[in-house]
Image (cartoon, rainbow, N blue to C red):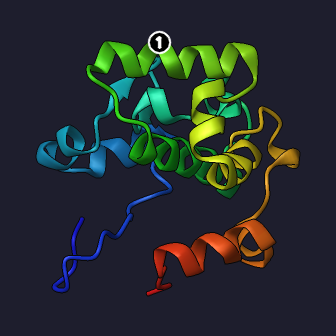
Amino acid sequence: MLNEHFEVKIADFGLSKNLERELMSSLPELTKSALSVQRLTGSTYEIGTPMYRAPEALNRGVVDPRCDIYSLGLIYFEILNCFSTLHEKHIIFSQMAREKRLPDDFVTSFSQEAELIAMMVQELPDNRPTSSDIFKLRTYQKLERLYKVSHD
């Protein structure tokens, strides 16, 4: 999303979770389709984009703000890494999940960013930084100056 100054803003996290039937029945059909809703079982629905879900969310584990850190790490990686096709993105994301590391060419080209992204996409939620932790990281502070990041 762009603001009035044409600055990129990333928003709308917290949607990678399961919803119970009662909540889903209260949502209008237009809202359901806008949220990319999938039916999982007779009483549970899932919303969000599977490709960006943290491992614990995919495995039906506990979903909390650390899932959003994982998703944001993938989005940050995607912003910096140019994909030719959706298929290529799917292959690289799958390799990252399987090999538990970022592609070597990406790390070479974006060493500072790769350091931060690698922390954000850790498989275990307890190994990921919180948003507060990220703001305190020296790597983030360098990138903040480089990209002139605002927090609004």
Q: Is residue 44 visible?
A: no
In the foreground, 38 or 68:
68
Q: Is residue 8 left or right of residue 111?
A: left
Q: Quadrant of the C terminus?
A: bottom left
Q: x%, y% of residue 18?
A: 52, 38
Q: Mark 1 — residue? A: 91
Count every numbered label the image shows and give the total: 1
Residue lying at 66% horizontally and 21% vertically, measured from the top left: 97
Q: Tell me if residue 140 comes above or below residue 124 in the rendering.
A: below
Q: x%, y% of residue 102?
A: 66, 30
Q: x%, y% of residue 35?
A: 28, 44
Q: Is residue 63 visible?
A: yes
Q: Quadrant of residue 47?
A: top left
Q: Quadrant of the N terminus?
A: bottom left
Mark 1 residue element: helix
Amino acid, disc 1: Ile
Q: Residues within 10 Å of mark 1 (few under 14, many from 20)?
A: few
In the foreground, 46 or 9:
9
Q: x%, y% of residue 124?
A: 83, 36
Residue lying at 51% horizontally and 19% vertically, measured from the top left: 92
Q: Tell me if residue 47 comes above or below residue 75 in the rendering.
A: above
Q: Is residue 93 left or right of residue 49?
A: right
Residue lying at 53% horizontally and 23% vertically, measured from the top left: 93
Q: Is residue 127 left or right of residue 107?
A: right
Residue lying at 26% horizontally and 19% vertically, measured from the top left: 85
